[in-house]
Amino acid sequence: MGRAGIEKKLAVSEGVLGAGMPYLAFGSGRPLVFLRWFTPDHANPTGWLRSAEIKTMAPLAAHYRVYAVNRAPGMAEGTTMADIATAHAEGMAAEFDGPVDVLGISSGGSLALQLAADHPAAVRRLVVASSGHRLEDAARISQMKYATAAAQGKRALHHLATQGIESPVKARLVGAASWILDPFLRPKNPADTLAFVRAEDAFDLSGRLGDITAPTLVVGGDRDEYYRVSTFEQTAEGIPGARLIVYPDTNHLGAIKHPRFAPDVTEFLDAP
């Protein structure tokens, strides 16, 4: 089935949450707010990126109306993760009748944790995937190098693409490919990218995990390039009653594509 067929089947629509946060909505059932992973642009994805997102979330869209939400464009310098969480809480309150299930993946997981800690009334159940209570140093450095280079108009993609690659040969090959592809994937508004990266750079919920009252599931892979298993463990241990699932032989993106991911999330969200 082609992209148009999949989008028709899932009833894909576009909208804006609250003060300018773009979203794609697809599937059917009760709402599931998916806070997107790191994206160069604060916009809905297009082309193959749109197709990839919908395909990744399709197993969950079979059970829920998925709202794939991005950060708002025009992010001001000095914006904090708490500011972004407040905007999302306000937008969700205007869009939905009550608390909703929230799935945060990667950078979206940072935001989801901040949202659940600061605005507990907004979150029914929380799933944090390939993310934790703070960024690891390697991830923080690579993101900042990427965002700073992009803001300066320099090639930047290789800073992200080579993160966590242990083989020097593979890292050089991936870096070379990223150097070539960079002009086609640069942020349209690098200031947005840099503002969000700075917000996540300062994000650290280590001392506030106990403020999260929503039932929580933390999911990760034991070969994640950005987060150690100990960070997943500390995140789950800090949240009262949280459950942890770590998939073996699984990397950062592999966790959300794991064959057990959608069934595990669905089982958790539908639990009595």
Image (cartoon, helix red, strand yellow):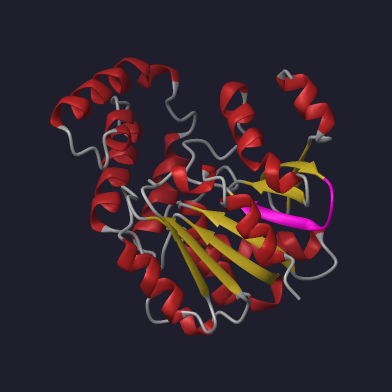
Q: Quadrant of the N terminus?
A: top right
x, y percent for residue 8: 83, 27
Viewed as shown, does residue 161 lie left or right of 271? left
Name the quadrant containing residue 191. Answer: top left
The foreground one among 249 and 115 is 249
Q: Residue at x 62, y 76 (%)?
A: 215
70, above or below 80, in the image: above
Q: Residue at x 39, y 82 (%)?
A: 207
The foreground one among 88 and 65 is 65
127, above or below 252, in the image: below
x, y percent for residue 20: 68, 47
Q: Is residue 42 inside the magenta stretch?
A: no
Q: Quadrant of the C terminus?
A: bottom right
Q: Residue at x 77, y 20 (%)?
A: 4
x, y percent for residue 81: 48, 62
x, y percent for residue 108: 52, 54
- State the extent of the magenta-drawn residues as a range: 28-34
Q: Residue at x 28, y 29 (%)?
A: 158
269, above or below 20, in the image: below
Viewed as shown, does residue 15 lie left or right of 125? right
Looking at the image, which residue sits at the far left?
A: 168
Q: Is residue 44 visible?
A: no
Viewed as shown, does residue 61 lie left or right of 83? right
